């Protein structure tokens, strides 16, 4: 049995002209239909409430993959907390992790001493994930916030955007505070940015910075688009050093 309301936390489906209810899935075909319907409901909800262009193909892909991949990350953390931590301290300034939830705020502020957050997700991700911290939530906690939005799986960012994010991290570090750098799962988009930060801080080559990060967060990875951004940023650092 699947409840249609279970796919959209807090959504007012009645306002959208739908009723929540239970459906009996007697076949795999039925399950596909109900799942597809739920995805459409999520799209409508995000479009109405967050002004997300929900019917663009790239956004549709992100939405279809969002909840399964978030659920997978939560499950792995639950079953293998030591091998798959929700967040990892990379050095004395940077903590890299997955989506921060409200239940984590006290721990991050008091134990980890965070004074800033760099969010590498798209806006809809922090609002679609139940109880995750948004830009407004961090402002209420008096935590500095910087966003560098990237599409999940295939997206990266430009060199100027990366440089601004690295400067933000350095500025918070100079205040004696730590920075929580996150994407959805704390694996790819945040890895790209933290690798760039490590290259800038320690003058490392991309592979050295990545291998160091992997020692701290073993399930981190970089895809082709991220490697291109990392290598471009390394060339920028080299140019800055010689100019």
Image: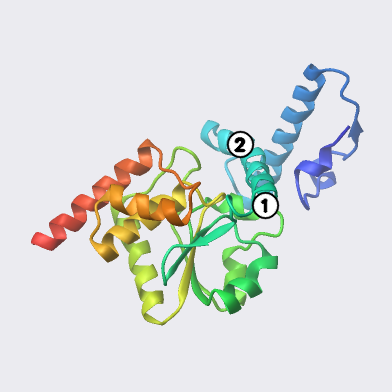
In this orientation, which residue lies closer to the viewer: 49 or 111?
Answer: 111
- The answer to whether 164 is drawn above or below residue 31 in the figure is below
Say which quadrant the N terminus sits in: top right
Pinpoint residue 210: horizontal percent, then vertical percent.
Answer: 35, 50
Q: Where is mark 2, residue-wise?
A: 65
The answer for how far apart the CA atoms under marks 1 and 2 are is 13 Å
Pinpoint residue 16: horizontal percent, then vertical percent.
Answer: 79, 43
The residue at 30%/41% (across/down) is: 228
The residue at 36%/50% (across/down) is: 211
- The answer to whether 178 is drawn above or below residue 21 in the figure is below
Q: Residues within 10 Å of mark 2 (few under 14, many from 20)?
A: some
Q: Is residue 83 left or right of residue 155?
A: right
Residue 129 is marked as 1
Check disc 1 and report its element: helix, strand or loop.
Answer: loop
Residue 137 occupies which quadrant of the picture?
bottom right
Pinpoint residue 221: horizontal percent, then vertical percent.
Answer: 44, 44
Q: Is residue 11 left or right of residue 178?
A: right
């Amino acid at each position: 049995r699947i409840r249609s309301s279970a796919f959209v936390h807090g959504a007012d489906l009645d306002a959208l002209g739908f009723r929540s209810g239970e459906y009996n899935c007697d076949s795999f075909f039925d399950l596909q239909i109900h799942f597809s319907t739920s995805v459409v409901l999520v799209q409508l909800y995000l479009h109405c409430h967050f002004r997300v262009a929900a019917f663009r193909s790239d956004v549709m892909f992100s939405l279809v993959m969002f909840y399964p991949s978030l659920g997978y990350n939560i499950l792995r953390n639950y079953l293998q907390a030591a091998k798959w931590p929700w967040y990892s301290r990379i050095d004395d300034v940077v903590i890299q992790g997955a989506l921060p939830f409200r239940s984590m705020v006290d721990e991050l502020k008091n134990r980890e001493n965070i004074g800033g957050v760099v969010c590498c997700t798209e806006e809809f991700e922090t609002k679609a994930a139940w109880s995750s911290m948004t830009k407004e939530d961090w402002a209420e906690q008096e935590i500095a916030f910087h966003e560098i939005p990237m599409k999940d799986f295939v997206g990266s960012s430009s060199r100027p955007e990366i440089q601004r994010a690295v400067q933000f991290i350095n500025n918070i570090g100079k205040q004696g505070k730590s920075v929580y750098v996150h994407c959805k799962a704390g694996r790819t988009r945040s890895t790209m940015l933290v690798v760039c930060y490590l290259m800038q801080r320690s003058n490392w080559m991309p592979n050295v910075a990545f291998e160091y990060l992997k020692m701290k967060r073993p399930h981190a990875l970089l895809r082709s688009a991220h490697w291109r951004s990392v290598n471009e940023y390394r060339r920028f650092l080299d140019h800055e050093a010689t100019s």
